[in-house]
Image: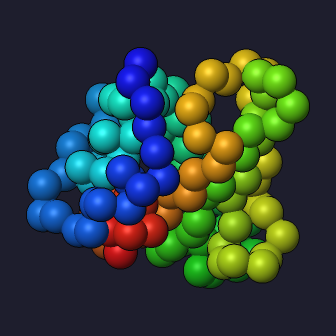
Amino acid sequence: MGTLTDQELNQFTGDLVRYRHQLNRSVIYTPGVRHMAEKGAAYWLIDAIVSHFNSPAFNRAAARDYRIETMHFWTFEKGHGTTGQLVARADGPEEPFLVQNIDYTDFPLETINIWAAFDGEHWTLYLPSEH
């Protein structure tokens, strides 16, 4: 695993290239997300996000807030030691609609945001700089 920095990720500003998730074929992601996963050894983070799509908790949240069906925002934050927490929100200051505690991580950044948007066919995961 190499060093990964926020400045490095901010260099990704949008691209037409997409990569398909291996297990959930309706999920694609951008070069910035792929770079984060490769350089930060964090394909697990993509998998964690994708595992919630169409889960009972996700579907209940989407039934309460229609925005979740088309776009939502994920934040991973490292905790104390080697723990972390992944949360999903409908929008910035909203309360999270999903929270997953991560028991172990060696992810190199303290926090990262990944946005998810649905185009009617695919969920696309991308970095905020790629919006």
Indicate the quadrant where residue 12 lies.
bottom left
Tell me if 120 is positioned left or right of 69 in this view. left
Q: Residue at x 58, y 30 (%)?
A: 107
Relative depth, front residue between 74 and 11: 11
Tell me if 11 is positioned left or right of 116 in this view. left
On the image, the x and y values in percent for residue 101 come to: 80, 35
On the image, the x and y values in percent for residue 102 come to: 75, 29
Relative depth, front residue between 95 and 3: 3
Identify the image quadrant of the N terminus.
Answer: top left
Identify the image quadrant of the C terminus.
Answer: bottom left
Is residue 1 among the parts visible in the rendering? yes
Relative depth, front residue between 89 and 8: 8
In the image, farthest residue toward the left: 16
Q: Residue at x 46, y 45 (%)?
A: 5
Tell me if 28 is positioned left or right of 16 in this view. right
Q: Residue at x 23, y 68 (%)?
A: 14
On the image, the x and y values in percent for residue 67 come to: 59, 80
On the image, the x and y values in percent for residue 118 come to: 39, 68
